[in-house]
Image: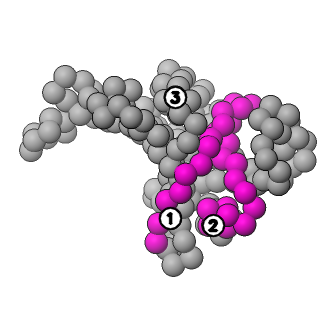
Amino acid sequence: MEPMTPNVTPSSWQAFRTAEPAFAVTVQKRFQQYRHHVLATLRVDGSPRVTGLEVNFRMDTLWLGMMPNSRKALDLRRDPRFALQANPGPDAEMADGDVRVSGRAVEVTDDAVRARFAEEVTPPEPYLLFRADPTEVVRTGIDGEDIVLQLWRPGHPLRTLRRKGDESPVRES
């Protein structure tokens, strides 16, 4: 299979926070507005599977927890690529923007890490735990008449792209 983003090595959430602290806080706050979000994984045949899930930010990590034998867990065990979209909520205006994280999910089997996570979150047992390592973090919002896209990838500075809702060219700011 082709990589999700060519030539992009996944990074840890901590590395993202270190590289772009203000943007990381914005993204994390957007996810923390709601309990349930949308996860996309890849089925055996390569087609997308979209399901709901809860995310947690603990120990400077973005965590994905799920039930054993859930289809999304089986998908991630087979192919760790994922895309995660923050719940847009009931506000059709999306004043806080649309936030997405893409990357690779790494299953965590270390008993000490799982125990620390369980101590803080108290997940229903049994559960699987995945660490989300981002390859891309995106926020899309509106600023006046502009659609503004903020884009971060490991090893690159945060980019801000602006465009109008017409055929105008994209501008980088």
For residue 39, above or below residue 145:
below
- Kindly identify the amino acid type of the residue bearing the numbered disc 1: Arg
Q: Is residue 159 visible?
A: no
Q: Where is residue 47 in the image (x, y as percent from the top left)?
A: 46, 72
* Mark sitting earlier along the chain (2/1): 1
Q: In the rendered image, which residue does mark 3 sit on?
A: 33
Q: Position of residue 36 (x, y in %)?
A: 55, 42
Residue at 19%, 36% (x, y): give it: 163
* Rendered residue at 47%/40% (across/down): 87
Q: What residue type is labelled 3?
A: Gln
Amino acid type at mark 2: Arg
Q: Looking at the image, which residue sits at the far left?
A: 167
Q: Earlier in the sequence, mark 3 or mark 1?
A: 3
Residue placed at 59% from the left, 49% from the top? 53
Q: Name the residue under label 1.
A: 49
What is the CA distance from the residue labelled 2 to the residue labelled 1? 9 Å
Residue behind mark 2: 71
- Which numbered disc, 2 or 3, marks the residue that appears first in the sequence? 3
Mark 3 burial class by Cα count in 10 Å: few <14, some 14-19, many 20+: few
Q: Where is residue 130 in the image (x, y as percent from the top left)?
A: 70, 50
Tell me the distance, in whole angstroms, between the alpha carbons under discs 3 and 1. Answer: 24 Å
In which quadrant of the rendered view does residue 98 lie? top left
Q: Give the range drawn in magenta.
A: 47-75
Q: Is there CB contact under 8 Å for labels 2 and 1? A: yes
Crowdedness near tag 1: few (<14), some (14–19) or many (≥20) residues, C-alpha within 10 Å: some
Asked if residue 105 shows in the view, the reply is yes
Q: Which mark is residue 84?
A: none
